[in-house]
Image (cartoon, rainbow, N blue to C red):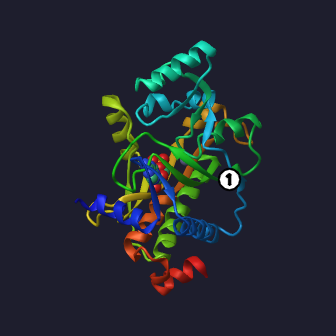
């Protein structure tokens, strides 16, 4: 049995994750959820005291038109999930039930709705803020959290299909966004150290699709547009990206017409916390019983 399967099996046995029969789609137990809630409170405690982000919570489905406009399908078609529904008449319904009864594919007549699954917590934000008109002096700072979907079924418990991302998003001038990102790269490392985990900061790239995507990934890495905090979860040697620090330059600003107060195209950046991955790193390092975690870690999380 490989390491990844064994951690997943131990998490199932402890009731921290609940098997649904689909790889990467799990229920969560109470203790697991408590760790996530306490860690989110710790994120708040580590945020700059004077920063007052606007808190917004979007549901895990987003407007399909906004998803199309974001260019996600150009870069990550392999990860996207769309919501389809039955829109037929009674005869279509009978055919569907018959298909199902015969074990055939009943989904091919399902029609696309106006909803797609949110791929990253910040995607619904940019068109929403653009609709308000130019940003005020000093730009904008937002606090988001959403379940996100990515079609990447895996036995690795740290690679889920539905997982939560907490994000802070900065919209403003290039200097404002770069300063925000540099600040969170520091804060993120201190935050992870506070819960007794080893961290390593590294440049990274997103999994852009296809051959052209490889070049996009290389360019993203060369320009240092993405950093990740890597933490051991299933393996000490092959660490898992648990926090990401992204600088999108003017991509979303140009796409959605985001403007700073003086009318320039706004730049954007975000810091994303993979909440399940952080909880998994904690269980993998400190054990499956939170009552037995080291006192400093318990104090950081439960006070
Ligand atoms: P990304 O937009 O890929 O940088 O993702 C933001 C954060 O979400 C990452 O740093 C991870 O911690 C987390 N994440 C990404 N993909 C997954 C996944 N398949 N399962 C669980 N967490 C993920
Ligand atoms: Zn983001």
- At 39% from the left and 36% from the top, the residue drawn is 208
Q: Secondary structure at mark 1?
A: strand
Q: Is residue 174 left or right of residue 132?
A: left
Q: Position of residue 22 (x, y in %)?
A: 41, 45
How many numbered tags mark residues here? Answer: 1
Q: Is residue 82 visible?
A: yes
- At 39% from the left and 66% from the top, the residue drawn is 13
Q: Nearer the viewer, residue 223 or 238?
A: 238
Vertical order, 293 against 114 (above or below): below
Q: Which residue is mark 1?
A: 141
Q: Position of residue 121 (x, y in %)?
A: 58, 47
- At 57% from the left and 23% from the top, the residue drawn is 112
Q: Position of residue 87 (x, y in %)?
A: 62, 20
Density class for disc 1 (Cα within 10 Å; few <14, some 14-19, many ≥20) is: many
Vertical order, 141 against 297 (above or below): above
**Picture quarter containing residue 114?**
top right
Q: Is residue 59 left or right of residue 191?
A: right
């Amino acid at each position: 049995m490989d390491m990844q399967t064994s951690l997943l099996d131990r998490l199932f046995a402890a009731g921290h994750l609940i098997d649904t029969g689909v790889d990467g789609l799990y229920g969560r137990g109470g203790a697991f959820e408590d760790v996530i809630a306490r860690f989110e409170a710790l994120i708040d405690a580590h945020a700059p005291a004077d920063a007052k982000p606007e808190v917004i919570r979007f549901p895990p489905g987003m407007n399909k038109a906004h998803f199309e406009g974001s260019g996600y399908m150009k870069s990550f078609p392999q990860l996207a999930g769309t919501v389809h529904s039955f829109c037929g008449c009674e005869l279509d319904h009978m055919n569907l039930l018959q298909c199902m009864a015969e074990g055939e594919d009943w989904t091919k007549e399902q029609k696309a709705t106006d909803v797609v699954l949110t791929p990253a917590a910040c995607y619904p934000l940019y068109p929403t803020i653009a609709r308000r008109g130019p940003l005020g002096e000093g730009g904008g700072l937002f606090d988001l959290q959403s379940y996100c979907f990515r079609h990447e079924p895996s036995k690795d418990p740290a690679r889920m299909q539905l997982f939560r991302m907490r994000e802070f998003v900065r919209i403003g001038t290039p200097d404002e966004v770069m300063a925000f990102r540099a600040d969170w790269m520091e804060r993120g490392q201190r935050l992870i150290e506070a819960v007794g985990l080893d961290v390593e900061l590294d440049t990274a790239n997103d999994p852009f699709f296809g051959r052209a995507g490889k070049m996009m990934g290389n360019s993203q890495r060369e320009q240092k547009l993405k950093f990740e905090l890597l933490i051991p979860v299933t393996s000490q040697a092959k660490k898992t990206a648990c926090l990401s620090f992204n600088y999108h330059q003017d991509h979303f600003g140009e796409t959605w017409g985001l403007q700073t107060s003086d009318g320039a195209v706004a730049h954007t950046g975000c810091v994303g916390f993979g909440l399940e991955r952080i909880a998994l790193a904690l269980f993998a390092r400190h054990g499956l019983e939170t009552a037995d975690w080291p006192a400093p870690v318990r104090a950081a999380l439960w006070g």
